Amino acid sequence: MKAVVVEQYATIDQIELRDIPPPSMEPGQLRIRVEAAGIGFVDGLKIEGRYQTKDPLPFIPGTEFAGVVTDAPGAPGGYQPGMRVMGMTRSGALAEEIVVGPAALHPLPDGVAAEVAASFRANYLTALYALSARAMLVAGEQLLVLG
């Protein structure tokens, strides 16, 4: 399978797409064919080794993804092959496949595009937190977003 692999902490332009073996599964895990993966500020920091925790090298970056369950021995969490899901994990989403436990997943409703779902949990919720808890934006105030 193809995956973005970080061999050493460096700038984003130094990471590469590689052919690697598919991830192995442990009992209670599911295999997901990734249709879309989000990449955000945290991923950039992790790739450069500047995040508050460091993933052991080599690693596959990416915390948000959406896709289809392809393997679910015992149907953990009620997930079955063919179900559309979105998920969030510590790393590994920038690959054709990811293996996660059911707690990392949520069913993806019909009509929600994979690329929308793959940017929802970390990026959208981080923005929501910034506006509500940090900036304390309230009804009636206006906000100008420049980037």
Image (cartoon, helix red, strand yellow):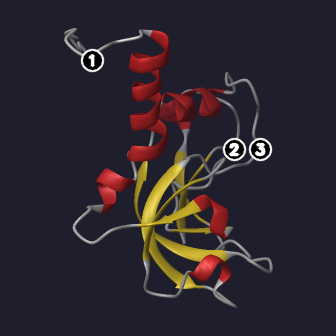
| Kind of element beneath mark 1 | loop
Characterize the local packing of mark 1: few (<14), some (14-19) or many (20 or more) Cα atoms within 10 angstroms.
Answer: few
Sequence-wise first label, 3 or 2? 2
**Secondary-structure class at tag 3:** loop
CA neighbours of label 3 inside 10 A, class few (<14), some (14 to 19), many (20+): few
Q: Is residue 78 shown above or below 74?
A: above
The percent position of residue 140, horizontal first and vertical second, equals 19, 12
Q: What residue appears at the point 74 percent right and 76 percent down from the top-left corner?
A: 24
Residue 2 coordinates in the image, percent (x, y): 51, 65
Q: What type is the residue that disc 2 sits on?
A: Glu
Q: Which residue is mark 3?
A: 57
Vertical placement of residue 88 versus 48, above or below? below
Q: Amino acid at mark 1?
A: Gly
Q: Which residue is mark 1?
A: 147
Distance of label 3 from label 2 (alpha carbons): 6 Å
* CB contact under 8 Å: marks 3 and 2: yes
Q: CA distance from mark 2 to mark 1?
A: 30 Å
Q: Amino acid at mark 3?
A: Leu
Out of 10 and 23, give the one closest to the viewer.
23
**Residue 65 point in image, percent of width and height:** 47, 56
Of tags 3 and 2, the one toward the viewer is 3
- The span from disc 3 to disc 1 (Cα, nearest Å) is 31 Å
Q: In the rendered image, which residue does mark 2 sit on?
A: 7
Which tag, 2 or 1, sits closer to the chain's start?
A: 2
Residue name at image x 22 percent, y 11 percent:
143
